[in-house]
Structure formats: C-alpha cells, structure tokens
Amino acid sequence: MNRRPSGERLLRIGLISDTHCNEREDASASPYPANAEANPRARWAFAQLNEARPALVIHLGDMINPVPELPTYEAAALRFKEIASGLTAPLHLVPGNHDIGDKPVSWMPAGTVCDAFVDLYERHFGRHYYAFEHSGVLFIILNASLINSGLGKEAEQRAWLEQTFAANRGKRSFVFIHYPPYVSSPDEPGSYDNIDEPGRGWLLGLVETYRPEALFAGHVHNFWYDVVGDTETYVVPSTCFVRHDYSEMNRISAGDQYGRNDVDKLGFVLLDIYDQGHVASYVRSYGRGVEADRQPCEPGPAAEWPARIHTKISAFDNLGADMRHSWAEELDVAPSGAVDEFRRKRARNDYPVMALWELGLRRMRVPIQDLVDGRTRRRMALMHSAGHLFHVYCYGMPMEGEAVLLAKHASLVDRLEIVINWDTVDRQLAELARLGKEHGIPVIVSRVNRKDAGKHSQSRYNHLISHGFTPAEGEEVAAKLVEAGIPPTMSGIMFSVPRSECPVQAVRWASGFERASRIRPCLYVKSTSASPAEAFVDDAANAIRILHASMAAAACPNVEVILDTFADADRGYFVRTGLVDRRYNLRPAGRSLAMLVGLVNGRDWLLETDELLSPETPERHALVGAEGERIVLARGGRDACDGTAGLSLTWRSPGGSSKTVPLLSHSVEPRVQIAEIPAPRRAERSQTER
C-alpha cells in the first residue's frame, strides 16, 4: 500500500501532548526539575503553533500535572487555560490520566477514573468524548481512561463510538486518544503505558473494521509508529519531559536528569492532511521555554525559509544513509519501580524512524539480514509504504533461504548490492545476471580487496576490509557487466569515496561516467580514513562533508549517494559521528542536512563551486535553480540568539529575498521546520530508470 500523500493540502492540524502544566510557574508536584519547566515549555509550543497557522489544535491529554485528587487541580486547570489562551486556532482537548484519573490499575497508588473525576474534568475542560467535522474530515476524541473501567460512562462511550463509526462508514476519519492501545506490539502484555484487554481488542477491532486513516495517542512521552490494518498509529512525545524508563533504548548515557530531560525529544506534531493521505511531522522544541513575562527569540519570519520535507513527500530519491546499527531494534525495558515494577516491557526503538522522517531521507542501505528477520521485514514493508527505498546488500550471492525471501519480497528491494570477491568475478557476475533477471531487482556490484591490492605497508599488516571500486576501475567493471549480459537499466556499480577525496568532484565524475556508460553509479561517501584508530568526531567537518556530498547529489540525480554513517560509531573501530547520535537525536550534520533537503526537494539544480580552493574545505558551494533560486553553503554566519559562528546556509528565493541560517546551532531550527511544506516538483523516476 502506498501511503505517500497526493493532491492538495486540505488543512493543517497542530497536535500537542502531555504539557503537564503546573499551578505555579516555579514549582511542580514532581520531584524532577524538568517538570518545573512545564509552563514555559507549553507556552513556547503554543507560540510556535501560532506560527504554523493550523486550522485547529488537538491536545492529546495530560494538560495539567496535578491529578484530580490534589487540591491544586483547579488552579492548574486555570493556569493551563491562561497559557493556551494565546493560541489563535480552536483548541480541542483529549482527557489524559492526569486530567481525569488513571485507567483501572491495581498496582498504582494514583486514583483511577470515576464518575466524580469525570464530572470534575467536564467542569474545567468540557466534554470527555465527542466527534466533530472539519473540511469533510471526521475527528473522533476518546476517553481512554474509561476503557475497562466498568463505569456506566464506559458503556455509553462504547455504544456511542460504535454508532459513530457505523453512521460514518466510508467517511475519512482520524482518532485521538491519550493511552495508546499498545506501544510496540498489539499482543504485548498490559502495562501502565497501554490499554489492557479486553478493551484493547475491542478498540482495535473497530479500527480494523472502519479503517480510520490514523490514530494518535500520547501518555508515554516517546515516539512510536505502527500500522493496524489500514490505519497508521502514532504515539506522540511530550512538550515537557521524556518518560525516562525508556532511556533503556539508548546505547549511551541517558543524559540530563537520567534521561527525563532529554530535550531533543521534546516537541509537537504538525499533521498535514492532503486530498489523499497525510503527513505527521515532528517539531523538536529542544526544551525551549517562554517565561510568563518574556517573548521568545525571534530569528526572522518563518515564511522566508522553505520547510523541512518529510520522507513521505520527499522527491530526493538518490540520497541515502548506511544503516549500520539496527533501526528497528526491540529490547526489554527493566522494571523501574515507578510506573511498572513486576515485569520487563518489550519495546521497539522507533527514534531512528523519526529521525529519518525529519531528514527527508528515503534511501536506506541495510544488510540482507533485515529482509531475513521477520519483524524487521515487517518494518521494511511499513517504511516502504511511506516512501522509503531499501538498498539491500550482502557479501557473495544470497544463500538459498535468502534467495527465496528476495523472490517473495522483491517489491521491498529497490537495489540489491552484491559485494563480490574479485578473484572469482566472471563466475559471480554470471550468477548476478541470473539473479537480476529472476527477481527483476536492479543489481549493484561492489567488491572487496583485490588480490593485487597491498596487504601490508612496510611493518604494518592490513587486516581491514575495503569495499567498493575506485574510479580507475570503472571502465573495466562496466565492460564486465556488459559481457555478463546485465543490461545497463538493471545494473549499477558501487564506488568508494575515501575521506581524503572531495565528494563533489567524485559525484561530478560519476555523473559523467553514467552518461557515457548508461550504468548507474552509486557512491559510498566514507567519513573515515584508512586507519581504524583515527577518530573523526569534529561535528563541523563532518557536517561540511555530508552537505557537500548532498548538494552534489541534488545537482546530479543520475548518481546515487550513500552517506556513511547514519548513527554515530562511538566505539570499536573507525570511530566517527553520523547524522544522529546514539540516542538518535540529530547531530549538527543531521540538522543541517534536514534543512538542505527541504530546500532542494522537487527542484532541478546546477552546482557552482570555487575550484581554486582546497577540495576538502572550500569556502563556498552554491546550488542554482531553474527559477533563479540559490542555496549557498559557506563558512561564517552568526546565530541570532546565541551568537554561535561557523557554517551557514543561505537561501535566496526566486524573488530575490534571502535569509542566512547558521548550521552548527539549533536555535532557529523549529521556526524553519514549521513553514508550509512545498509540493515536490521534480518528477520521480520509475524503479528501472533509477
């Protein structure tokens, strides 16, 4: 199923969750300092939502922090209303457990939902379940705490929802609820974080029967994505704090306040609904706040800068990342002693997916083991339906079981990279030709060390793997492919671009190679040197290299570029930073690339560069568009808020107005992200043409 949207954008919805506003500005019932920042952080998010100009805003629950049992509940409700009063769009509220009482749970001391709590909620916030229409779309608000409660109001909501779905069968609809039906798997055990059975099965049954387009939930203060039947499901992070028991998913330290104040994960969602399909874009707040008597830093009008492009609507299909680390990892979250104590929780880390969507990257280079593993293959299918293109690689010809799965799931594989041993090249290319014809998958050939390559240098032995061809081998390999009977439209060659080589020059050479041979080149842009002991952890230098390669890819759509690496390699051999760190928060290279992808998406470009300067560190590269727009990457620039100097990106619109944004600070990033999303203009190529 293709979940990429089409047509015009009908409307934009703002989604915000778990603001946990306090009754006072400087205190919270929680012992964590992050909770005391709730009010300023909510105020900042509402101000940014105003900049995005949504048709309406939906709060997914836990508007306030004091629970109904506390005497401070009413004061907190009034403070929330005061903070939200500046919102220019209509605000719709979903009751959260802090607002209306917890779901029935015997091991927690907090008060559970009851008739008195529902009445209290209605007095301060209005209806606790209802539906409304806007622009021909039905929006359904549910009270999750009622499910499995046994209250009369649960039966009333149950009957109402069944009738509402039945009466609107076939109508486009979206569902909003606080507790998610599940976090990672529909059959996971009940926990503090999900809806228990039998209510879960009832709700998911309705979802599968009536097929709402999407379901959005909050409560867990982290991000997850899945599909139930035909319905996309999202768990949305908080504006206030992270549920840090899930910091178990990090491969590095949890961070500030043991992960609770991992500010890179805070923010809100912009939901763009199109004629067909939707896009849910996450806007990171980085913990920014606005005090009651202050205004946020103003970096400039948001409309001057094109927005980030979500993968679902990205047309930039010849740029990708090497997914060395697992991007769909499942792991056990240890009992925390707080909200869950009596069993481990199985959870999938979906932050790699969230980061990929922010970057607008479609192409993912993954090992064939991802296709073999059933759970990861299911995730590949979901990501493929959202627009991702999988570049699958393996060493040597696929084994029998792998070949069977390739044949069965060929639609998931956009490219099949076979790394061959050059000593047996003729025999392996013949097998490669047969494989490509059988499965209809374009094949990319790569190689490991040739036997005539040096294994040692003076007293040092080369015990390292080198894969990918050099440009000097291009003609030889092209001739071998033709001799093996592999047609140019179904073949490609992987070339390696060492750290010492300029990726811009490499991409330009590869573009000429493709025009001469008609064989698709793929460049693996390395971020390391030949020494496994040399670390490359300079964020600025790595961001420059990634942006140079990406700008060249934008100007040469006949060349595929794979960036090494998506996530930090922060231990072991060849240490280097990537687009994201090991918490899967965007690094400067990732934030910069996200801005660039938003600028180049859907347009045709020519590349200008100052050839007189060092190829590794040129002062200026520029992309020039057909309508006179320009993108200039240069050293210099100064942040409007914190004065950080360094690398800058300048956008000059066709009308002549320009704006410069420094790239090594993220103080202006959210304003950039919430500008309106332009529709892609560059026509996408078919699979065989790619």
Image (tube, rainbow, N blue to C red):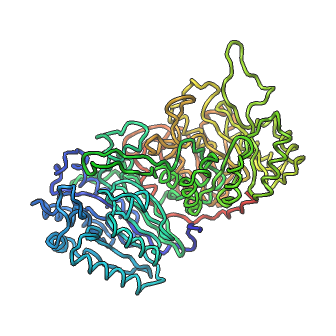
Q: Is residue 10 above or below residue 85?
A: below
Name the residue nearer the viewer: 361 or 52: 361
For the image shown, how many numbered marks are present on the structure?
0
Name the residue nearer the viewer: 300 or 277: 277
Residue 145's spot in the image, x, y percent? 26, 67
Farthest bottom residue in view: 167
| Quadrant (top left/top right/bottom left/bottom right) for the N terminus | bottom right
Residue 348's spot in the image, x, y percent? 44, 51
| Quadrant (top left/top right/bottom left/bottom right) for the C terminus | bottom right
Name the residue nearer the viewer: 351 or 103: 103
Farthest right residue in view: 483
Q: Residue at x 71, y 17 (%)?
A: 457
Residue 620 placement, left or right of 568: right
Task: Work out whether residue 249 can be spotted.
Answer: yes
Residue 45 placement, left or right of 212: left
Farthest left residue in view: 71
Name the residue nearer the viewer: 241 or 666: 241
Residue 253's spot in the image, x, y percent? 38, 36
Residue 536 placement, left or right of 77: right
Q: Is residue 370 above or below residue 499?
A: below
Name the image quarter holding residue 615: top right
Task: Work out whether residue 652 can be spotted.
Answer: no
Residue 489's spot in the image, x, y percent? 80, 56
Residue 165 placement, left or right of 477: left
Q: Is residue 93 above or below residue 333?
A: below
Name the image quarter holding residue 76: bottom left
Q: Is residue 419 above or below residue 174?
A: above
Q: Residue at x 54, y 47 (%)?
A: 593
